[in-house]
Image (spheres, grey):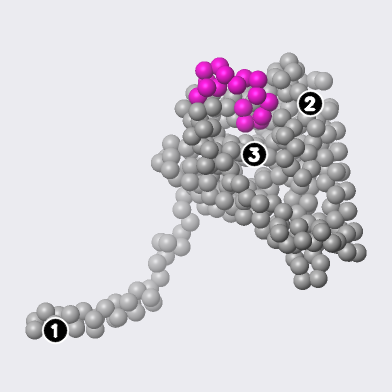
Amino acid sequence: MKRFVMAVALLVVAPAFADADENSVDSEILQRPDPWAEVMLVGTYHFANPGRDMFNSKADDVLSERRQREIRDLVARLAEWKPDLVLLEYSRDESEQVNARYAEYREGMHRGKRNEAYQLGFRLADILGHERIAAVDVEHRFYSEQQAALDKAPKGRYRGLSEELQRYGKAFVAASDEVMASRSIGDILAWYNSPEALTANQDFYLNHQIRQWQGENQGGAHTIANWYKRNILIFQNILREVEESEGQAKRIVVIYGQGHIPILSQLVEDTPFLTAVDLAPYLADNTSEL
């Protein structure tokens, strides 16, 4: 009987406490936490010309003596910042295999690989003596099913916008090809990471792709949603690497395709957990002439 009375008393008192909690303000939880780490985002072109993007620039041979000298100089400048962790555009699901290749790289293998992950990422991590690199990419469909359906039977307005999108993409590639033909690797990346080039890349989506609809089919918006979703998942993987380092990754460098940088930069700016570092001073190259 005593236990029954106690149980009833708890049931009566509990709602009163619940009401008090609901009316109180937890001011501490409203305060933004201190940043976990500084992040340097390095947007790059694909050194090996894999042709995986919708529009692809033509890179010359990064294994040439001149380009190798420029890459060594660039990596040396990036190393001056002394990052604790290098994050690369490899699928997180393949982290074990990627780090096995990185271990082989540290033993002198794979030096002839043209991919920017090897030429910049592996090289930088090796110089700094890092035991591992972080693979943070996520595979995700780019073109939406809705837009694919539109492309099968494009009509007036949509057809014109699609042609405009093609012209825009080709113009951006032509501009980047001109830069790559006349500048050093450091200066090429300085251009790719300039506000003008980053805005031009983002305009592909928010000036052109966003206007691609036909009737009630919002194909362009669904494609952009796919692109944003992939980048948000990448960003979460970046945060996971920092959090799981338990304070060991205070400075991180993320080397990624330039097209990802506008969205990743915005996410870095908006999150309380990361602070962006200006890349420009580490890319400046006044010593290499063609």
Residue 29 x %, y %: 42, 62
Please tell me which residue is depicted at 57% across the width and 51% down the height of the picture: 233
In the image, residue 85 sits, relative to residue 62, either above or below, namely below
Which region is colored magenta? 103-118
Q: Pick whichever of labels 3 and 1 is earlier in the sequence.
A: 1
Question: Marks 1 and 2: which is nearer the front?
Answer: 2
Mark 3 vs mark 1, CA separation in Å: 65 Å
Q: Residue at x 46, y 59 (%)?
A: 31
Q: What mark, if any, has residue 60 been given in the picture? A: 2
Quick one: 17 or 24, which is closer to the camera? Answer: 17
Seen in the image, is 190 located left or right of residue 5? right
Give the crowd class for mark 2: few <14, some 14-19, many >=20 residues within 10 Å. some
Place of residue 256 in the rendered image (x, y in percent of width and height, measured from the top left):
64, 39
Please, what secondary structure does the residue beneath circle 3 have?
strand
Q: Is residue 113 above or below residue 87?
A: above
* Residue assigned mark 1: 5
Q: Label 3: which residue? A: 256
